[in-house]
Amino acid sequence: MEWGRLDCLVAFRRAHEAMRLAADENHASPQVRGTRIRQAFQASGCDEARERLILTATEDVATAIDASYHSLREVREVLASGRGITSADYHAAREAHGDATRAARTVLRRDLSSQEA
């Protein structure tokens, strides 16, 4: 497995952290807050990392990465809608993203093991 596959999950993590930081900033309006959170997501490079991985991944890896990616987008939408990092909605989205990301790690590890064999 090339390191680029692992970089995808790292980009997802960076996006999550950048969005959390943006959510905690003081903003002039809810619209500015939403824009800032979406910009943090875009600047993380997770879209590009996902696309690079999807192009070369097996179907099970692509499916797992997509699930993690889409759950991260849900985190983005929760935060961009004005709900903060202490909200129940954020905690539910964060938990779903954590579950999807752990599942993606499992699939990536299995893929790595099969390539080493």
Image (cartoon, rainbow, N blue to C red):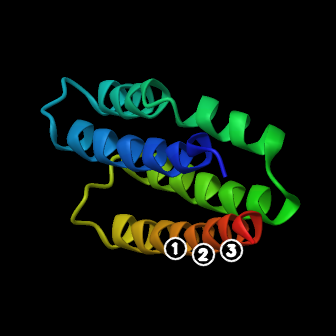
Q: Residue at x 56, y 68 (%)?
A: 105
**Amino acid, disc 2:** Thr
**Amino acid, disc 3:** Arg
Q: Residues within 10 Å of mark 3 (few under 14, many from 20)?
A: few
Dot 1 and dot 2 residues touching (CB under 8 Å): yes
Residue 36, horizontal then vertical, whole percent: 34, 27
Q: Which residue is mark 1?
A: 102
Horizontally, residue 42 falls left or right of residue 37, namely right
Q: CA distance from mark 3 to mark 2?
A: 6 Å
Q: Residue at x 50, y 66 (%)?
A: 97
Residue 26, horizontal then vertical, whole percent: 12, 32
Q: Residue at x 60, y 75 (%)?
A: 106
Horizontally, residue 33 falls left or right of residue 107, namely left
Q: Which residue is mark 3?
A: 110
Rendering quarter of residue 40: top left
Dot 3 and dot 1 residues touching (CB under 8 Å): no
**Amino acid, disc 1:** Arg
Nearer to us: label 3 or label 1: 3
